[in-house]
Image (cartoon, rainbow, N blue to C red):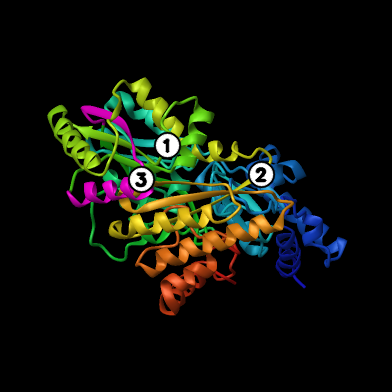
Amino acid sequence: MSFLQVLRKTSGIVLRKSLTNYAPTTVTVHQRRQKSTHTLAKEVSDSVVEALTSVVGAKNVSTALPVREQHGRDESHHICTPPDAVVWPQSTEQVSQVARICYDNSIPMIPFGTGTGLEGGAVGYKGGVTINLTKMDEIVELNAEDFDVTVQPGVTRETLNNYIKDQGLWFPIDPGAHASVCGMCATSASGTNAVRYGTMRENVMNLEVVLADGTILHTSGPGKRSRKTSAGYNLTNLFVGSEGTLGIITKATVRLYGIPESMMSAVCSFETVHSAVDTVTQVMQCGIPMARIEFLDDVMIDACNKFSNLSHKVTPTLFLEFHGAQEAVKAQVELVEELAHMNGGSEFQWAEKQEDRNKLWKARHNCWYATLALRPGTRGYSTDVCVPISKLPDIIVATKEDIINSSIVGTLTGHVGDGNFHAVMLFDPNVPEEFEQIQAIAANVNRRAIAVGGTCTGEHGIGLGKKELLIEELGDGAMMVMRQLKATLDPKGLMNPGKVFLN
């Protein structure tokens, strides 16, 4: 039996056993290999590690358990499953050579950025080699006049914005976490600004990708950065959202935007969830170009008040932001205030200074940690969906009722301007009944979204947790084509195995 077959056979058994206990334990390499012989595992491990070391250097390869455990988890509830080794390449050529070594030895590869995912996309589900790309952190080329930039995978969105702000430019895609730009490409991230500036899918112009066998691919052609193209298949968007299952993104060329002349933020509270979300629906139907429009339910506002030292009224609340010329922003504000008041909204609390806006949006970005702080010692389960804007009020209210009718502590928040919202629920790993309740609530919200023409994930991705839902959403025909594409680009099934596809 080959090394890869051993990993596939043993890892599935151990992981299923661990899931039934809902415990935050580590599945070790020894457990995954429990049916293999010591000689086989050691022989393959030594030869592969030696080959990897010859490419990236000894200091850039680790088989230490603490390092592997660090790379066996992300921010999700999924159990830590470490890879067999971690490598830190420092160039595309090194990534290519590492991939070739893994391919020739039939060893799984897991791309790793900042580890901020929420669906287990970075865990070593079937062992293998995790390729940590954070040492490739160069901003390769900034074209300020053309509003685009090319970056390596170790560049985070915050690092990029600090670099380009003196040029009067910014990269607005903002998932909240200190995520890497290429990692955001891999998950098709979006965030608070998506309602105006779109998601990664609309803002990526070209990608450099290393395929499973080490082939280096430029999805729009080497060095190409035109704003649009009709030349051939859209390979760029094939890899955006592929979650590392088709290749390793080693460079991304993305669009930039001018920093708006005027930026104003506001908070408005409502008596009910329905009235707050109705306001969002009406704002979008009126075509008002909101930069951000975020919903937080009463439990989430209470958590933010405690965690971020705020004093907002503990009721369903909207966080809003307006961008543009001063006169245009003033007109937008008047229209939104009128709609909010029609739905019983409070007077707007304004944050016009940059430091006040930063404090407001930092509190919003800390929603995950604020929720975890409501029950210290518990773990968080986050799920997100996206639905047509007209369906948003009913599905949020239904989800809120599900949480209220359970024994679970949970919060609702979302980028509701584009129909995307999140439920974060807390469970004690030692109380299986809590996890079972959360699974039922999550299944309800995801299937409701699919039923009304939406998606089971607006930005988190499929990862480990939503593979069955993906089949329900896309149907057999689309899944067949996806599998054929996967088999063509990754014939051995080595790229981030166990993710996206059910088996």
Q: Quadrant of residue 328?
A: top left
Q: Is residue 240 visible?
A: no
Q: Nearer the viewer, residue 270 or 390?
A: 270
Q: Nearer the viewer, residue 385 or 3?
A: 385
* Residue 253 circle label: 3
- How far across and down, in percent of the image, does residue 368 sit? 53, 41
Region in magenta: 259-286
Specify the farthest residue to the right: 38
Residue type pointed to by label 1: Arg
Q: Is residue 412 above or below residue 388?
A: above
- How far across and down, in percent of the image, does residue 84 sit? 72, 53
Between marks 1 and 2, how big is the CA–CA gap? 29 Å
Q: Residue at x 59, y 61 (%)?
A: 439
Does label 3 or label 1 sit earlier along the sequence? 1
Look at mark 1 in the image and give the residue it sits on: 157
Does label 3 or label 2 sit earlier along the sequence? 3
